[in-house]
Amino acid sequence: MFILRSWNRLSAGLCAVLTIFVLAVNPFVQQVISLDTRQVNVTDGAANLPIASQYIGSVPSTTLLNSSMQSAIYEGILALDNRSFVPTPICSTGNCTWPSYETLSICSTCQNVTHLLLSSTSQEAPEYQDYMLPNGFRLDQSPASMFDSWTFYNMSTAMKPLTFDNEGSVLSNIQLIYSTMPSRVEAFECILQVCVNAYTGGEVNGQFTETPQREPWTNTSNAWLPDNPCATGQEIAAQSNCNQQDWYFSVPGHKDDFIFDGLTVDRLMGFLGTSFTETYTGNYGVNPGFGAFQHPVLEQRFFDVLSGSTSPNGSFPSLLSYVAQSMSLAVRTTNGESYTGSAASTYTVYRVIWPWLIFHSHLLCSLLLCWRLLRWKHVMRDYSPGKIA
């Protein structure tokens, strides 16, 4: 009798513990449902992305470059770090994809040519240190002891190339020598050139990103030259019998040529020449110095970048990269071309995670079985032989 009573107490205790455990687990049964987001293509959705297979940026019947490209050059020069120059696509659903595509662009490439600098002093003024590149481009500098906080720079687009070939798709060869006193002296040769970039694009929840698929096709990286023999760069294009010739670029795997308008080439070369030709000596904001630049805002911008007082700190190549990106955006958005991708609509799928559901079911079945056994024991006890009613 004692053993039977002990077993009943033990059974009741186990059932009670199991009941408490089920009550503790029960609030988490909602985890048996999983929400998955899926996409389905929408056939009538809009997914258009600006690209350019040809570009015309000159103003008809004038000698002017169109205002969008002029603004793009200035915006690139004045851009701060983290500025993004990406096109704005039309995506009706907010979720679109554009497989591999190619577009006319502007690319920048820079070489640090500081190692080519030659320094010299004169007997008449030995305290003055001058710097010169092998092509004769020079920076005349004042002594550090007199102008410790001054910045000196000389910038030109009219000098003979040092490390780049001016033939092909080069729009401007920019050479720079600058010094931030007392001891930093650097020289760069940079080019801005027409190129073809390949991308894949995607927009997710209204956020567009563009991923390069390969290195740009340029005349320097891929021996890629215009078909037209007259359109071979600054020097030849300046000849009267070669003016205003379009540039035709053939890219492997692309059935049509990319075309850059010859009049636009002439206008761009001239505008870039005036934008990146400057001689400056001074401490901007303290002593205005002796600039020879027709755009004071750009003069201050070059000073700020080279002196390291603003972003991209002391990095002329980074500044040229922003200019190229801004110009590329103007090329892609001026003539109204677009590339059609696919638009997708999202929907939610409710999915049952079965292990959780089965686990909870097992607990409930075990609890039910436990109480049924316990009830059966009580019934058997009530009907035991010899029990007096």
Image (tube, rainbow, N blue to C red):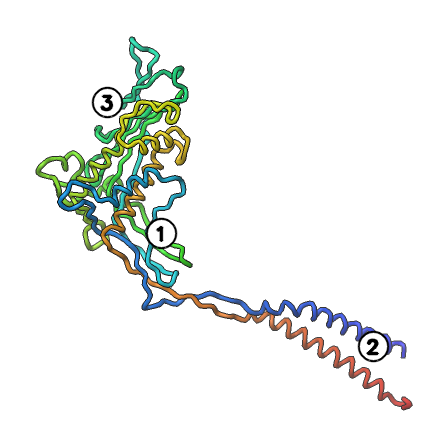
Front: mark 3 or 2: 3
Q: 85 or 199, which lies in front?
A: 85
Q: CA distance from mark 2 to mark 1?
A: 72 Å
Label 2–label 1 contact, CB within 8 A: no
x and y percent of residue 90 in the render?
A: 33, 58
Vertical relation: 170 (above or below) 139:
below
Q: CA distance from mark 3 to mark 2?
A: 107 Å
Q: Is residue 86 visible?
A: yes
x and y percent of residue 33 in the render?
A: 55, 69
- Mark linked to residue 8: 2
In terms of sequence position, does the residue under pointer 3 or pointer 2 come before the other?
A: 2
x and y percent of residue 177 in the render?
A: 31, 26
Q: 61 or 131, which lies in front?
A: 61
Q: CA distance from mark 3 to mark 1?
A: 42 Å
The amino acid beneath tag 3 is Gly
The amino acid beneath tag 2 is Asn
The residue indicated by pointer 1 is 210
Vertical relation: 153 (above or below) 381:
above
User: How many neighbours does mark 3 have within 10 angstroms: few (below 14), some (14-19), or many (20 or more)?
Assistant: few
| Secondary element at image label 3 | loop
